[in-house]
Amino acid sequence: MASSETALSFSRLGREIASPVIVDLMARALANSDLLSLAAGFTDNVALPRGLVGRFAAELTQGGLDDEPLQYGQNQGRSRLRELSCQYLAAQPGECAEAFDPAAMFISNGSQQALYLAVQALCDPGDIVLVEEPSYFVCLEMLRGLGLRPIGIPCEGDGAIQADGLAELLRELDSAGERSKVKAIYLVSYFCNPSSRSLSLGEKRAIARVLLDVGYEIPVIEDAAYRELYFDAPHPAPSILSMPEFAPFPKLYLGTYTKPFATGLKIGYGCCTHSEWLEKILCIKGHQDFGSAHFSQAIIERVLDAGLFQDHLAFIQKHYAEKAFVLDHALREGGLREVGWKWHQPAGGLIFWLRAPEGSDLRMESVFCKGCIEQGVLYVPGELCSASGGLWHCARLSSGALPPNKLREAAGRFVAQAGVLAQSSGSSGS
Ligand SMILES: Cc1ncc(COP(=O)(O)O)c(C=O)c1O
């Protein structure tokens, strides 16, 4: 606070809110081009759809359109965009045509806003949201910012949910008298940020079964931000909206046009199966902004209507597959596996989830992290992706933004620090 400013009495949110780490990571990446950021989850400037956006922006600014895109639009979002989005989603592997209903969809300022609105509608401070361990760190910060308690579901080292662990956790919450506080479960089910893995049909079924067995018919939020960014083939599991096992649950499916199209247009969406929950979400959105950027929506709508989204996807899928290959190769070639680090080669998305030998400390204030920053490379410490504050030995890297030569250089700097860490702790490949 500047000394000349009057002291304000802030709300609980105003008092407790801190700047999200993501904002800091993005600012650092943008401010210093010598610092190679494997942290910020940017898409690649080279893969942005300049031609398509330019063409449709020109068409949309000619004027005389019934649904003037430079004017305010509907709070829920453009109806044609919702219709086209539902058609697109219904055509994905395993989906039922009737699972995606334009009337149940709302357009948002990225899927991040949809998530925030959905959580705000459900939760009061002190409430619990169950998350994977690891989970999307921006969501964890957002939940904590709202005074909520994200609780990690027991998972394997690679992020796979342990069904028995989930059942045990739910029973523990029961015994602790917390059942009524558990307001939702949040799953990042396709090429997850950060674990990079996708939930199989069997895993999804097991989650539904356990929740029902223990009597938790709680809202299920499925975040599919990276679903379109597969490398060779779409992940075969349908969304929870098409799975009969999830029929008893209130459901929200979140998707986005930022990652698979243009991050800067910042358009995402939610598809909510519960009419009252949707109504509340729309009320909050109405209070917040009474509709997402109409012009951005209209551009995406045109792209979908012209059947050009698929072509763009085919291009970026190949592009991001190549970049993931470059990063994977550079980490291997550098000898990261030889010093005991593990990771799965992603089959889609922008993220790598690396696990250093147990006992390693890669937290923000660790010698390793400081060393990386000194050497000019940034990553997201795994701890930030952990509801419990664990996962100190993990790191999230993104292959999305840097060009291949910089990815190799960044990987080289990172691996060099891993070498230093291995020497100092005496660890070797195992
Ligand atoms: C898992 C996940 N969900 C949601 C979002 C929000 O994306 P957007 O608001 O750009 O749609 C992101 C962004 O990185 C993400 O990684």
Image: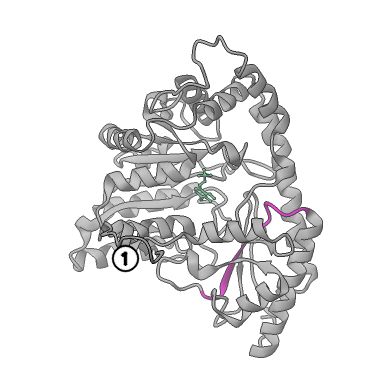
Q: Residue furthest left?
A: 177
Circle 1 is placed at which residue position? Answer: 169
Count residues near mark 1 (Cα–Cα under 10 Å), then give few for <14, some for 14-19, many for 20+. Answer: some
| Quarter of the figure with residue 108 | top left
Quarter of the image with the N terminus is bottom left
Q: Find out whether residue 391 is within the magenta segment.
A: no
Q: Is residue 127 visible?
A: no
Height in image: 427 above or below 189? Answer: below
Q: Position of residue 380 (x, y in %)?
A: 57, 65
Which residue is pictured at 31% across the width and 36% down the height? 287
Q: Position of residue 410 (x, y in %)?
A: 74, 65
Quarter of the image with the C terminus is bottom right
Q: Find out whether residue 401 is within the magenta segment.
A: yes
Q: Residue furthest front?
A: 4
Q: Please give the range of residues in magenta.
A: 392-403
Height in image: 186 above or below 133? Answer: above
In the displayed structure image, the side of residue 354 where residue 186 appears, left or right: left
Q: Amino acid at mark 1?
A: Leu
Height in image: 296 above or below 415? Answer: above
| Quarter of the figure with residue 280 | top left
In the displayed structure image, the side of residue 215 where residue 167 appears, left or right: right
Q: Is residue 357 visible?
A: yes
Q: Position of residue 187 (x, y in %)?
A: 44, 51
Q: Position of residue 83 (x, y in %)?
A: 48, 22
| Quarter of the figure with residue 228 | top right
